[in-house]
Image (cartoon, rainbow, N blue to C red):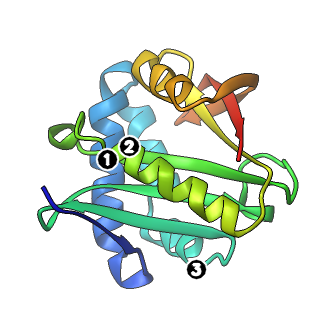
Amino acid sequence: MTIRMKKITTEDVETLQKISIKTFDDTFGEFNSKSDLEKMYETNYSKEQLSQEINDDNSDFEFIFVDNQLAGYLKINFSEAQSEKMGNDFEEVERIYILKEFKRRGLGTHLMNYALDEGRKKNKKEIWLGVWENNINAIKFYEEKGFKPFSEHVFTVGSDKQKDILMKKNI
């Protein structure tokens, strides 16, 4: 199995949009109404919104490939790009999404290690993320990586307000 990563650029926005919707739908689709999902996709995953995020110097999007097949992606944020005001000593992992057929192959660990390395290069002290309170597998994964809960925030899917557990770890 050959794993490689590729920085996402605006030329990749259509592919990013497709994998964003697919991975979110695979993971959370059954827990949300179709109308709420459609509203979220129109807002969060529009080509315009994704292009704006890609072009933000304080965000980094990376595709991950397995044997030249797109398997998932990562989005990390620094400074003002973070979804919560955490300050300049923090790095946020906003998204780690893996297509279901590529899960359980160590790709999440590969992406997390990349995020940790980027935080170290930028002299960040802590890395944090939000995870849906009912996503037990993800919570367990982050705990295994040394993340600890420290707060919570609301994540809105369409009109549905859901609770994310905020977790962090020293870098």
Q: CA separation, marks 1 and 2?
A: 4 Å
Task: Identify which amino acid the numbered label 3 is placed on.
Answer: Asn
Label 2: few (<14), some (14–19) or many (≥20) C-alpha neighbours in 10 Å: many
Q: CA separation, marks 3 and 2?
A: 24 Å
Q: Contact (CB < 8 A) between labels 3 and 1?
A: no
Q: Secondary structure at mark 3?
A: loop
| Mark linked to residue 58 | none
Q: Which residue is mark 1?
A: 107
Query: In screen coordinates, is 126 left or right of 67?
Result: right
What's the residue at 40%, 43% (across, down)? 109
Q: Contact (CB < 8 A) between labels 3 and 2?
A: no
Q: Which residue is mark 2?
A: 108
Ranked by sequence position, the earlier of labels 3 and 1 is 3
Q: Secondary structure at mark 2?
A: helix
Give x and y (percent) for residue 119.
67, 60
Give the quarter of the image for residue 130: top right
Label 3: few (<14), some (14–19) or many (≥20) C-alpha neighbours in 10 Å: some
What's the residue at 53%, 32% (across, down)? 145
Q: CA separation, marks 3 and 1?
A: 25 Å
In the rendered image, the vertical position of residue 75 relative to residue 7, given as above or below:
above
Query: In screen coordinates, is 153 left or right of 71?
Result: right
What's the residue at 42%, 66% (across, down)? 62
Query: In screen coordinates, is 148 left or right of 156?
Result: right
Give x and y (percent) for residue 105.
22, 40
Q: Secondary structure at mark 1?
A: helix
Give x and y (percent) for residue 106.
30, 41
Ranked by sequence position, the earlier of labels 3 and 2 is 3
Closer to the camera, 158 or 75?
75
